[in-house]
Image (cartoon, helix red, strand yellow):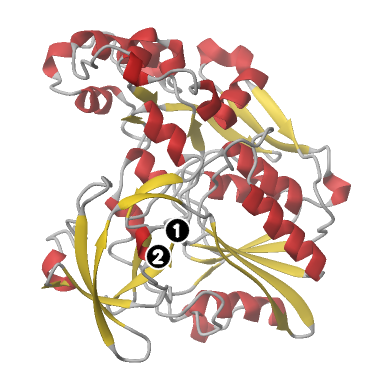
Amino acid sequence: MKKLKWIIGMVWIAFAACDPKEDPTPNQNGSDIKKAIVDTMREWYFWNDKIPATVDLTKFATNEELLNGIIFKPLDRFSYLTTQEAFNNSFVGRNAGHGFGFAFTSDERLFVSFVFDEAPAGKDGWKRGWEITQINGKPISEYKLASGGYDFKLGGPDPGISNTFTFKLPDGTTTTRTNVKAEYQSNSVLDRRVLEVGGKKVGYWAYQSFRATAGLTPTRSAEVQSSMEFFQNQGIQELIIDLRYNGGGSVAVCEQISNYLIQSANSGKLMYTNKLNSQKSSNNNSVNFSKIGSLNLNRIIFITSRGSASASELVINNLTPYTQVVLIGDNTFGKPVGSFPLSRYNRTLVDNNVELVPITFATANAQGKAEYFDGFPANYQVGDSPQFPWGDQRDLRLAAALQYIQTGNVSGRMVDTYYKPKWEMIDAFKGLQQEFPAF
């Protein structure tokens, strides 16, 4: 599994020498590509024994329809197709779009939930807590679907697409901004600070995605390193990690964070195990903790939501056997399985710039906890507050976390604020974009 772990974490380097522009014009929906998808799935797919024995390729108009037609539907909500460039770029934060997120309050008012600094929205000065009252001249209610969800019709991520937004700012004024999508480098850390609470130094870390920093070997995040060193230097005694909008990302970065958070006494102990399908069981592997830094925390408080998925859940699961883990907010998404890209194993996929990213492995922690497809339940369910800036103690979920640190409990008044959103941003995306959700 050493080799496969390297593939998961270093995939963008592996493809650096494979320039699709030098390949023949891709025949994206040809039968040769469909056959390559089926053959590769039969070899590597975690549930490969559930693939139909015979697959009639002529019944599927597109590669996406084919993949959707052969995956194991009861559990697989995650396998997808993309391009090699899109996959590689996403895992190091090279994106395109406006570069922001949405979230609803309990009364279905829509707010900017986060903004990437270098994205078009960030450069235009957008902030978390701005209320969005209109999109392209229409009130938010006009984008509501019969299902209760929303389709804001913002178009794809392609540079050059523009949308116009009307905001109500925290001071009560309004502003209308036209924003043009462009390529940008995203930041994973949305906020970091130290709060003085009850005589304790409490670190607060809003972390949006497990993205690696391009060019670093071994694979890791410079943002993670900088944040953890900041908290170490500040001498924090407690840590709140806000993953409420974090859809996942790099397993290697998840390991990096886990190694910062584990206590020194547990360094060298089992972090997690990987399990592949029966044909690939020789690649099953265990990963142990290797302590980084000097943080020595007795517990970690995570702020979570249904948008907390994949690597977010893996870091929670990794730490649970060794430290007190408290979840505040809402139940997580439920993705105890992972993927690595498979085009490198099939020349037809490489030649046609088709990246196949199906579920290829499952993980379990040191206690054997593995199948959390319904997500991890929050210890305390508390409503979201996207109308307040990062670190503002009027934010109900942050306030609840701070209350827990001071009293060991969350009050009934806080719990009464809980509401289950009919739509969350993760619902707007599929595949690669669901792992790194942003508009």
User: What amino acid is found at the position of numbered circle 2 in the picture?
Assistant: Lys
Q: Is residue 250 visible?
A: yes
Report whether 90 appears left or right of 2: left
Q: Residues within 10 Å of mark 2 (few under 14, many from 20)?
A: some
Q: Residue at x 29, y 90 (%)?
A: 173
Labels 1 and 2: the sequence-earlier one: 1
Q: Say if mark 1 contacts mark 2, CB within 8 Å.
A: yes
What is the x, y in percent for residue 241? 61, 63
Q: Residues within 10 Å of mark 1 (few under 14, many from 20)?
A: some
- Determine whether the residue tagged by mark 2 lies in a helix, strand or loop: helix
What is the x, y in percent for residue 192? 62, 67
Q: Is residue 324 visible?
A: no
- Determine whether the residue tagged by mark 1 lies in a helix, strand or loop: loop
Q: Which corner quadrant of the image does residue 7 belong to?
A: top right
Image position of 279 with respect to 353: above or below? above
User: Which residue lies under the disc numbered 1?
Assistant: 118
Q: Please identify the residue farthest to the right as the structure is shown.
A: 265
Report the quarter where the N terminus lies.
top right
Q: Residue at x 12, y 61 (%)?
A: 146
Query: Is 169 in front, or is 184?
Result: 184
Report whether 57 appears left or right of 11: left
Q: Which corner quadrant of the image does residue 70 belong to?
A: top left
Report whether 397 appears left or right of 49: right
User: Which residue lies under the disc numbered 2?
Assistant: 123
User: What amino acid is found at the position of numbered circle 1 in the picture?
Assistant: Glu
Q: From mark 1 to mark 2, how far is it between C-alphas?
A: 6 Å
Image position of 433 with respect to 227: above or below? above
